[in-house]
Image: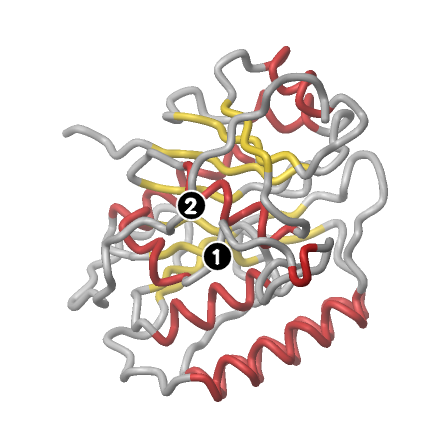
Amino acid sequence: MLLPSVSVVVPALNEARNIPHVFPRMPPDVHEVILVDGFSVDGTVAVARELRPDVRIVRQTRSGKGNALVCGVAAAAGDIIAMVDADGSADPGEIPRFVAALLDGADFAKGSRFLEGGGSNDITRLRSLGNYLLTEFFNARYGRNYSDLCYGFNVFWRRHASVLGLDATSPPPGGGSGLLWGDGFEVETLIHVRVAKAGLVVAEVPSFEHARIHGVSNLNAFHDGRRVLQTILIERRRTRRPPLTQPPIRLRPGTVVQVVQEGTASSALVAGPEQQATGGSG
């Protein structure tokens, strides 16, 4: 059986010291690794090219993690897209587990730190409580039963990319450095909202979150938690979600899942040109 090709999208901003810990963990049979650079000044691009000469470099069009992810998705050529953070918190070696969930019938596979086989040595009690409350609120609003909303390890079929409805090409607001809706850390929640509204079949996959290896996270628990809450509320008001075709599936290692009915979605790729770096570390 011919296995689907996998594109790994890695958003990075000044992660030169972390990339050497992330790239060696990539499964050897991935189709491509796309590093989306946020105009790093620490040699991130040069380090990435040294470690993996075949890496594809994409410059993000605005700022923020969300914009970096959508730029990478727009450039991806694989059948499956895996989103992996560059700080070492997510283990790319887990990608085959997510791919197995898709091959078992899911449209979208999301990581969970709170299923058996998952975990975290990074999340604080405050962040864990906030995540729990936001997850329960999300589930009540969108009829899902997720165990972990605010975790960014996501893998999905590229044919469903248009469901995300994210913009890779528009200039920043006012021509400056502002963020468009979905450009910030709220992007994972925005993705999950739109996946739920499209009625896609989602599998939760156990995943272990490691502590950031070097540097300090740009995540702010209160500020970004508020943006997540706003995302849940604002997206709910925009359009009414269709009835779910299948409740989310929770997978454990070795579990075989039979999906009775898949969700439907447009197959068009997210619009946006690939932007190759012209050299240097940005």
Q: Which mark is residue 71?
A: none
For the residue carrying disc 1, how many other residues have a C-alpha within 10 Å: few (<14), some (14-19), or many (20+)?
many
For the residue carrying disc 2, how many other residues have a C-alpha within 10 Å: few (<14), some (14-19), or many (20+)?
some
Q: Check disc 1 and give the amino acid type.
A: Asp
Who is closer to the viewer here, 83 or 227?
227
* Residue 172 point in image, percent of width and height: 64, 56
In the picture of the structure, the residue carrying the numbered disc 1 is 167
Q: Say which quadrant the C terminus sits in.
A: top right
Q: Check disc 2 and give the amino acid type.
A: Gly
Residue found at the very far front of the displayed protein: 175
Nearer-N-terminus badge (1/2) = 1
In the figure, is residue 193 to the left or right of 101? right
Tag 2 secondary structure = loop
Residue at point 30%, 73% (across, down): 199
Tag 1 secondary structure = loop
- Asked which quadrant contains residue 61, the reply is top right
- Asked which quadrant contains residue 2, the reply is top left
- Asked which quadrant contains residue 19, the reply is top right
In the picture of the structure, the residue carrying the numbered disc 2 is 272
Residue at point 43%, 82% (across, down): 142
Who is closer to the viewer here, 253 or 162?
162
Who is closer to the viewer here, 100 or 38?
38
Residue at point 49%, 87% (across, down): 140
**Are the residues tagged 1 and 2 within 8 Å (C-beta)?**
yes
Q: Say which quadrant the N terminus sits in.
A: top left
Q: Does residue 274 lie above or below 47 as drawn?
A: below
Residue at point 42%, 48% (across, down): 155
In the figure, is residue 210 to the left or right of 60? right
* Residue 20 point in image, percent of width and height: 69, 21
